[in-house]
Image (cartoon, rainbow, N blue to C red):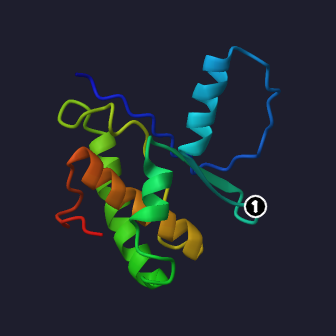
Amino acid sequence: MKIFVSIILITLFLFNCNTSKTIGLKKNEHTENIKQNDTVKIANAELEYEIIIIDPGFSGWLASMAKPEGYYSQSYLENRNFIYVTEWNQRVNQPQQYNPNLYEMSIDYQSNIDYGYDVNYKLYNYFIYFQLTYKQQLAGFVPRI
């Protein structure tokens, strides 16, 4: 069975753009609702970046299973995220060794930029969710909740 994972992590400088929504069949509306419910968007207008995570079940997992905001310090999250992003990007660049359906796009995360607590919290928790859900281990840390 082929694992289909839609993960879009965009950390490039983007501007929001709205597209018109067409009315379609109820099945298409249902599919669109599922996509919206499984989408976590993190944006910071000052830094002009945006991260969009689309992964079935992540938003529900974040709300129900993740440690609450404030549990980890921002420096802890930044340190772990830098390690996870480094490992993630290495796997993106080795599609012959790692499943390219899991590691689709690289992440532009720079340690010298203050992304704020919210971004670091959600990104960290995505890495935990990803490792637990897809039975992956990034950077030698055993993922725990």
Q: Position of residue 79 (x, y in %)?
A: 37, 75
Instruction: Say which element carries label 1.
Output: loop
**Residue, far top:** 25
Camera-side residue of 25 and 82:
25
Camera-side residue of 87 and 4:
4
Counting labels gives 1
Look at the image and tell me in which quarter the N terminus lies. Answer: top left
Q: Amino acid at mark 1?
A: Ala
Q: Is residue 123 at least partly visible in the picture?
A: no
Lateral position of residue 105 relative to residue 98, left or right: right
The residue carrying mark 1 is 45
**Residue, far front:** 26
Q: Residue at x 22, y 37 (%)?
A: 98
Q: Position of residue 76 (x, y in %)?
A: 39, 81
Q: Position of residue 102 (x, y in %)?
A: 32, 37
Look at the image and tell me in which quarter the C terminus lies. Answer: bottom left
Quarter-of-image position of residue 73 = bottom left
Lateral position of residue 99 relative to residue 116, left or right: left
Q: Is residue 95 at least partly visible in the picture?
A: yes
Q: Residue at x 34, y 40 (%)?
A: 103
Lateral position of residue 8 relative to residue 25, left or right: left
Camera-side residue of 141 and 27:
27
Camera-side residue of 104 and 134:
134
Lateral position of residue 92 relative to residue 41, left or right: left
Q: Residues within 10 Å of mark 1 (few under 14, many from 20)?
A: few
Q: Position of residue 38 (x, y in %)?
A: 53, 44
